[in-house]
Amino acid sequence: MTLHQNLIAGEWVGGDGVANINPSNTDDVVGEYARASAEDAKAAIAAAKAAFPAWSRSGILERHAILKKTADEILTRKDELGRLLSREEGKTLAEGIGETVRAGQIFEFFAGETLRLAGEVVPSVRPGIGVEITREPAGVVGIITPWNFPIAIPAWKLAPALCYGNTIVFKPAELVPGCSWAIVDVLHRAGLPKGVLNLVMGKGSVVGQAMLDSPDVQAITFTGSTATGKRVAVASVEHNRKYQLEMGGKNPFVVLDDA
């Protein structure tokens, strides 16, 4: 079985393989995915830091072309990727395909946003002086995503981060690495320069902790449990980094008597 590797500094890097099992049919092995070490995570952060100066100054047409190409491929492969999502997570096929379409639309939207980047010019209270407001990328962004929307949530974090000139270290949920690997593969082939996007699959206690401990990660976006989110916040304050948390979501359901 082919080992799906981590992407660090533009190169596919191996590691101990972990089987990705279909929760609806435990005889179905979706694939084998490399588990990154703390050293891998540190290498990914270093690669993202090295790639940031050039990527943050890249032209908006370059970023637009990469994101648009990614959107087009995701939408073209919606049935294939939707089936992968359903196999690795357990959603119905219709939900898997629908979420994949949503991911493609997110990349398409932010491809357009690269062409709409703007600042502001406002008058000063002092005569003869103008105030110009511009927006700059944060730097190296750590992205940590959950299992419940394994292609949509990565899309809505990856696409804007790349659109606005940030570089990325991306750790998807350990239980559902397949869709995240597929998105990263598409972006890599779409022409992202080496080190701009780094994928480190593995345990949060290892890979995620390395991201939290690094002073070179300027921002982190996290979706997951409240307990882990609190740890992200505390570590981010320690390093004076920007952080974004979406925590503790609940999905209510009804179990009927004849279930």
Image: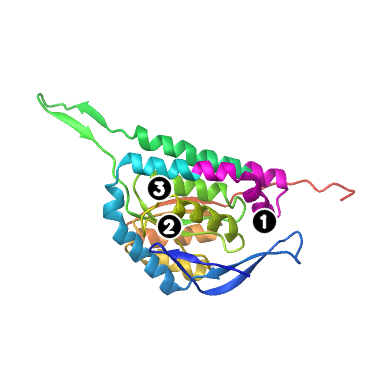
- CA separation in Å, label 3 and label 2: 19 Å
Characterize the magenta stretch by its predominant secondary structure: helix
Of label 3 and label 1, which has the lower sequence position? 1
Q: Counting residues from the N terminus, which is met first, the one under dot 2 or under dot 1?
A: 1
**Residue at the image point whose x is 88% and y is 48% from the top:** 257
Quarter that holds the N terminus: bottom right
- Say which amino acid is labelled 3: Ala
Q: Residues within 10 Å of mark 1 (few under 14, many from 20)?
A: many
**Does residue 33 appear left or right of residue 254 in this picture?**
left
Q: Residue at x 76, y 67 (%)?
A: 27
Q: Residues within 10 Å of mark 2 (few under 14, many from 20)?
A: some
**Circle nearer the N terminus (3, 2):** 3
Q: Label 1 sits on what residue type? A: Glu
Q: Find the magenta span and give its range.
A: 71-98
Q: Position of residue 180 (x, y in %)?
A: 54, 56
Residue 204 placement (x, y as % from top left): 51, 66
Residue 193, picture quadrant? bottom left
Q: Residue at x 16, y 26 (%)?
A: 125
The image's mark for residue 161 is: 3
- Which numbered disc, 3 or 2, marks the residue closer to the eye? 3
For badge 2, the amino acid type reads: Ala
Label 3 SS = helix
Asked if marks 3 and 1 touch (Cβ < 8 Å), the reply is: no
Residue 50, relative to residue 127: is it above or below? below
Give me the disc on residue 89: 1
CA separation in Å, label 2 and label 1: 28 Å
- In this view, the residue in front, 64 or 234, is 64
Which residue is identified by label 2? 233
Residue 48 screen position, x and y as percent:
35, 60
- State if disc 1 and disc 2 touch (CB < 8 Å): no
Q: Magenta span has 93?
A: yes
* Magenta run includes residue 63: no
